[in-house]
Image (cartoon, rainbow, N blue to C red):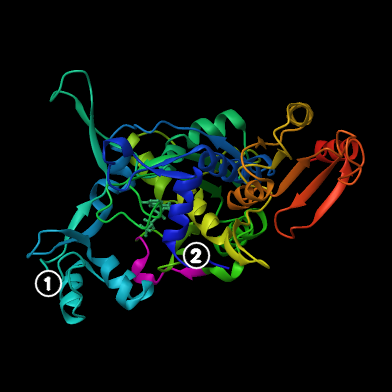
Amino acid sequence: MPATSLDSVVSLCKRRGFIFPGSEIYGGLANTWDYGPLGVELKNNIKQLWWKTFVHKRQDMVGLDAAILMNPKVWEASGHVSNFNDPLIDCKACKQRFRGDKLLEEKLGIEAAAVLKLEQVQPMLMAEKIPCPSCGKLDWTPAKKFNLMFKTQQGVIEGEGTDIYLRPETAQGIFVNFKNVSQTTRMRLPFGVAQIGKAFRNEITPGNFTFRTREFEQMEIEYFFDATINKWEDVFAQWKKDSWSFLVDQLGINPENLRFRDHEKDELSHYSKGTTDIEYKFPWGWGELCAAAAYRTDFDLNQHQQFSGEDLQYTDPDEPTRKIIPHVMEPSYGADRIALAVLLDAFNEEKLENDTRTVLKFSDKIAPIDLAILPLSKKEHLIAKAQELYKKIIQETDLTVDFDVTGSIGKRYRRQDEIGTPICITVDFGTLGEDEAQGLKDTVTIRDRDTLQQERMSIEDLTERLARC
Ligand code: ATP
């Protein structure tokens, strides 16, 4: 069940320590968010699962971690200095600034808005009578291009440094290292390079919680291939499939809340032959979750070869006289946007017999806490027994384990449901051998988050089963 509102997820995130407003004690900084103790576990699990799926479990992929600050020429070669623009419009009445295409998108849909030219944005806003969301007046300036790159300076003397940019995507770090990677790894085409890291965009209208922020994390792949051997349509179709499978089979997102969206011809960059996004049904409508595959031809390596003067050709190991500039397929995912979709998708409010419960039904692969150990009461010798079990599990497995003693057992179950813990283990007086009605000595109760079923199991069987996790 998708979340009924974004507000309920935002408030759960704050209440339980997933995501906090940034710099909160200073009144915040608009649209910045900090991941709390549970949020960082969730996002790390998503990133690690992505890395495992696309790097460790594939022979044709390697990883990279390039610097955020790069030579400014990189952004000239990539086209970001001249082309990385959004259509900025001002409300003449209240002077607020907006992204014209996004206002049109809300009314006309993502497909219609995506193909509009810069000069069409303001007339279309007037024709569709789309008023300023801030003051309600209909008085727009013509749209102008606004470059989204954050500029900063490198150097010790203020005003004398060189202008540089915070990277607006991680992809270019891969292209500029293509030669280093292919020479040091001796990878043969087709092969891919993956990278996870921060990217920065001076978005005109960030918002919808962590959906659009100015600082975010990307997980990107550049997959290099010889277009005379591999048909781009086949590579494209395979990456669409792999991207979809990561979201559905690994992260556990409900496929009914996902759809592919092919970019229209007018929407494609001049060098791209095809791009398909995967969109998620957010509470405010369909929105891009990731680029499942974007075919970038040989544009990027050619540009960097030309601007850097370095030979970036790949030498065919079977035919050393044959040198080519490989073509590239780019799947690109936003870690924060995916974490948001995962939270929304996992959010459920369930009616029980005499109660309702909020539960985050995360896939076991990414739940921030794998299991919680709950001593039934605060009696010292019971806590000591539960602590013994806790220590045994964290020593013998790689699981993330919570130990919770505060509040009634019912309240603690609800708390673990709300943070999405798949399994709770209760240690009681039966475990101690003091009350057979609760269970046999050295057995514990295991409660399943989703079915609410409780099962009694010996500690020995339990730790053996968990050791296999
Ligand atoms: P949008 O149309 O939403 O601005 P985009 O097409 O510019 O996104 P890409 O350049 O394809 O996005 O970036 C790849 C991925 O990075 C996106 O699918 C998204 O998951 C993530 N991403 C891009 N911009 C942001 C942002 N401002 N905040 C959070 N995540 C982002």
Where residue 156 sits, quadrant-wise, is top left
User: Is residue 202 found left or right of 318 in the rendered image?
Assistant: left
Q: Residue at x 12, y 72 (%)?
A: 137
- The 10 Å Cα crowd at callout 2, few under 14, some 14 to 19, many 20 or more, is many
Q: Nearer the viewer, mark 2 or mark 1?
A: 1
User: Is residue 108 found left or right of 424 in the rendered image?
Assistant: left
Q: Residue at x 12, y 74 (%)?
A: 138
Q: Residue at x 50, y 30 (%)?
A: 180
Q: At which x and y percent is residue 385?
A: 79, 29
Residue on which disc 2 sits = 280
User: Is residue 191 found left or right of 273 in the rendered image?
Assistant: right
Q: Is residue 467 visible?
A: yes
Depth order, front residue of 464/114:
464
Q: How many marks?
A: 2
Amino acid marked by disc 1: Lys
Amino acid marked by disc 2: Tyr
User: Is residue 408 found left or right of 144 in the rendered image?
Assistant: right
Where residue 170 sits, quadrant-wise, is top left
Image quadrant in which the N terminus is located? bottom right
Q: Secondary structure at mark 2?
A: strand
Residue on which disc 1 sits = 137
Q: Magenta stretch: give its range.
A: 260-269
Q: Residue at x 29, y 66 (%)?
A: 102
Q: Residue furthest left?
A: 93
Q: Is residue 196 magenta?
A: no
Q: At which x and y percent is residue 127?
A: 17, 81
Q: At which x and y percent is residue 165?
A: 28, 37
Question: Of marks 2 and 1, which one's residue comes earlier in the chain?
Answer: 1
Distance Cα–Cα, label 2 vs label 1:
31 Å
